[in-house]
Image (cartoon, rainbow, N blue to C red):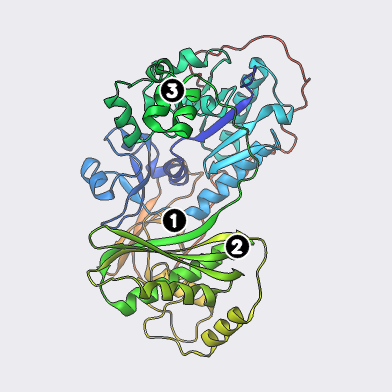
Amino acid sequence: MRAAPTILHLDMDAFYASAEQAAKPSLRGKPVVVGGLGTRGVVATASYEARRFGVHSAMPMAQARRLAPNAAYLVPRFTLYRAVSDQVMELLGRLSPLVEPLSLDEAFVDLEAGGTADDTASALEIGRELREAIQAVTGLSGSVGLAGSKMLAKIASEEAKPDGIRLIEPGTERAHLAPMPVRTLPGVGPATADHLRRAGMTTVNDLAEAGEAELIRLLGKAHGAALHRMASGFDDRPVVAERDAKSVSVEDTFEVDLHDRVRVRTEVERLADRCVQRLRGAGRSGRTVVLKVRRYDFSTLTRSETLRGPTDDPAVVREAAARLLEAVDTTGGVRLLGVGVTGLADYTQEDLFAQAAGERAAAAPPEDGDVPPEDPGGRAGPAEPGAGPEEAAEQLAARRWPAGHDVHHEIHGHGWVQGSGVGRVTVRFEEPGARAPGRVRTFRVDDPALRAANPLPLVPDPPDYSSWPASRPKSRSGAGAPGAASRP
């Protein structure tokens, strides 16, 4: 535990939905829901306007539509979200060499390690400057929590939402946590909370007063001891600059259960290729291939095979995944498939096994129904014969118009898909900087003047923060107001 609140936690506000509202003037101030739009899709993020209707993350999309039938429902645009996340992480990197990203929109920062704060006043000043910088560079808002530990900093940022800053003064942790529900603490999920409730413990104060011995009796030595320390306000976990990934995996949930064994194998091979693409993108290789199968009755099976050495050969991963599939009964239907690689390493072991697999794959004729890896899910149908990778991607994009994704028309310019069906696609033509909603046009899905496009920057000409933050003396005097969250 630190004597100064120099651990910062940033959490962007309703990140995906806020990015969509910033990019689409017609959606500002309106309920927006981002996620999978199929019958089995789930909500990734809901705007604060949508949350008023009861919509929240991880909710089935069908339930969200019943609660907020007039909201805008959009397919995620991860290209945009990653670009904005890179801008935010670059700003955080200017504050300290110790930045621990938790996701695209969330991270811890050790301000003390960067020399940018060493007391309450300097921490609050940096927190406010950071929020201003994020707003100026990305057009989005983020909530900031400051405390002497990671646990309290994260709790503070949650209390600051939306669009605020909250500081928990070191020394007040126990009193601050006492009235909170037990699920506030990391590692307390629904099952653990129910177990504690049956033992008469519903608040963090109940856990602290129960004592370490009682919690160990209820939850086991490791979990019980850790929970008692957190309930007492102790958390000495450091901010870790780099997290070493333990696995790489991809999975797909299908609109309709798959019964055709050939189709199931084709999907497994496609997932294996996507998994290897991610593996290579991270500059890694792996030794263990894992297959995940969720069947029609929601039962989930996992099978794994450990290779003789690390590999990033797609043919090797495909063959291993296919072998694992042979040991799984898919007779009743398959609703989800996943392929992963674990046992990651920074090198690839070139061996005869991998070379032989590659040669077999190269010599084998393509199977019926094969689709290029650019087609997400194989639902658009194969590209035209003879098309190269870029041409295939363009042809496939022309057949699928996901709601919310970017398009460009030769006459009307940049826009986004409002919806498509029965051979038509409806587009609203507007750009992030526009002050008023754009006009709507409808086209044939195969209109040659309409094509998929890349997202536009949310802030076309962001200010230069290359010299931020300004150098500051190591020791500062005065005290900020660590009370309730402040908002501009």
Marked residue nearer the N-terminal end (1 or 3): 3
Instruction: State the SS at label 3.
Output: helix
Instruction: State the SS at label 2.
Output: helix
- Res. 213 mark: 3
Marked residue nearer the N-terminal end (3 or 2): 3
- Which residue has dot 1 on it? 415
Q: Residue at x 39, y 76 (%)?
A: 266
Q: Is residue 75 above or below residue 394?
A: above
Kindly report the distance in space between the C-alpha atoms of the residues bearing marks 1 and 2.
30 Å
Neighbours of disc 2 within 10 Å: few (<14), some (14-19), many (20+): few
Measured from the top left, where is residue 301 in percent x and y?
A: 34, 61
Q: Nearer the viewer, residue 114 or 87?
A: 114
Instruction: State the SS at label 1.
Output: strand
Q: Nearer the viewer, mark 1 or mark 2?
A: 2
Q: Is residue 155 above or below residue 26?
A: above
Neighbours of disc 3 within 10 Å: few (<14), some (14-19), many (20+): few
Q: Nearer the viewer, residue 318 or 462?
A: 318
Kindly report the distance in space between the C-alpha atoms of the residues bearing marks 3 and 2.
47 Å
- Which residue has dot 2 on it? 281
Measured from the top left, where is residue 17 in percent x and y?
A: 41, 43
Q: Residue at x 53, y 57 (%)?
A: 247
Kindly report the distance in space between the C-alpha atoms of the residues bearing marks 1 and 3.
61 Å
Measured from the top left, where is residue 57 in percent x and y?
A: 36, 42
Neighbours of disc 1 within 10 Å: few (<14), some (14-19), many (20+): many
Q: Is residue 10 above or below residue 180?
A: below
State whether residue 463 appears in this view: no
Of the residues shown, which amino acid type is indicated by label 1?
Gly
Of the residues shown, which amino acid type is indicated by label 2?
Gly
Q: Nearer the viewer, residue 78 or 150?
A: 150
Of the residues shown, which amino acid type is indicated by label 3?
Ala
